[in-house]
Amino acid sequence: MLNRVAVDLGVRSYEVRIGQGLLARAGAEIAPLLRRKRVAVVTDETVATRHLAALTAALTAEGITSTALSLPAGEGTKNWANLARCTEWLLEQKVERKDVVLALGGGVIGDLVGFSAAILRRGVRFVQLPTTLLAQVDSSVGGKTGINTAQGKNLVGAFHQPSLVLADIDVLSTLPDRDLLSGYGEVVKYGLLGDAAFFDWLERDGPALRQGDAAVRLRAVTRSVEMKAGIVSRDETEEGERALLNLGHTFCHALEKATGYSDRLLHGEGVAIGCALAFELSSRLGLCSQEEPSRVRAHLKAMGIKVDIRDIPGDLPGAETLIGLMGQDKKVVDGKLRFILARGIGQAFVADDVPGDKVRAVLDDALRS
């Protein structure tokens, strides 16, 4: 089965195609976009080992020639040096403005390659071929591209929409369990922010997703993409509703910065912890009952994903330092932190006036427990 989800952005509209065997059909899927049968592929070394040969064969079968660059794997790759390396390599390949660049990999590759495509010749087209659950349900859709800097995560970037997204759920079978669960942190987020029935379904069928059930994975990815595509279509540049997609991310980005964007904390793990903290904060502010954060935590624990700050190995800074790191978050407006809070599961909203002492208390308790 092939599911198609439209991202409706006028002349920049595109499809997200979700199904099995898409990597093997990538040449046929991409060919209609090409002015000349030539593409440049950027991936990482881990993904290249697993999937580059299959993609190259699919392109060759359609008479499409390709060249490839493999960057180091890991969040640390999303930096100035690799942005320069990628962009200069694309120039060396003589990529023209009407050509297409392929981003084969997880969120790191998608974000970095998308940003490179945005600035190359003032904008070339690119196609996302996400190979992780996190990238399939979140980062490959919506056109947010960028890199990390010493000051924080994703603070330099551009909105640059892909021309097509091909989410092959078969490739998820090659993911280590921890990486799959990291992506699940973003899947759960969609239920928590705006679809209580989806969260109900995840409570029941989430374990089957982890165990490899293709039908469950297809539904989970499709519903997540439907929710994100709808929000992006209504608010492309995060002037309002799109901020809801950052549920858990204010906490998450501070924790990622504190752990040096390392394997101590994967992004989706940070999102899961951040969602649990956001619901705890919401409960303490009287916005939802204590049963809601307890339910969120219980499901995350049942799935085996990190849910508490203490689940992060190694030392962490105190609450004041973490709040200071939040001050560099992209959601800061007029110097004030913005949090995505919730009145219940599926009922998230943007809050601009969260008392700092309440945030500090939540973090203090989380760090002590």
Image: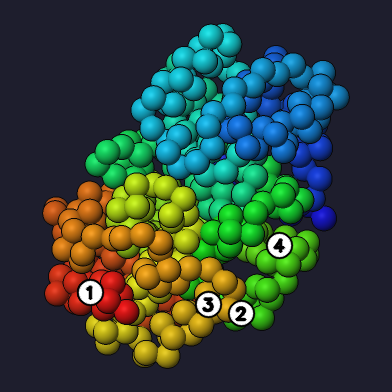
> Within 10 angstroms of label 2, few (less than 14), some, or many (20 or more) residues?
some
Residue at the spot of label 3: 301
Q: Going 27% across and 38% down the picture, which residue do you hit?
A: 150
Image quadrant where residue 304 sits: bottom right
At which x and y percent is residue 45?
61, 32
Tell me the distance, in whole angstroms, between the alpha carbons under discs 3 and 1: 21 Å
Tell me the distance, in whole angstroms, between the alpha carbons under discs 4 and 2: 14 Å
Mark earlier in primary sequence (3, 2): 2
Name the front one of labels 3 and 2. Answer: 3
Q: Going 58% across and 33% down the picture, which residue do you hit?
A: 44
> Within 10 angstroms of label 1, few (less than 14), some, or many (20 or more) residues?
some
Q: Is residue 30 above or below residue 198?
A: above
State the mark number for residue 364. Answer: 1
Residue at the spot of label 4: 217
Residue at the spot of label 2: 203
Tell me the distance, in whole angstroms, between the alpha carbons under discs 3 and 4: 19 Å
At which x and y percent is residue 136?
61, 50
Name the front one of labels 3 and 4. Answer: 3
**Contact (Cβ within 8 Å) of mark 3 with mark 2:** no
Tell me the distance, in whole angstroms, between the alpha carbons under discs 1 and 4: 37 Å
| Side of 114 where 23 appears, left or right | right
Mark earlier in primary sequence (1, 2): 2
Q: Going 22% across and 74% down the picture, which residue do you hit?
A: 364
Specify whether residue 239 is in view: no
Q: Is residue 107 above or below residue 367?
A: above
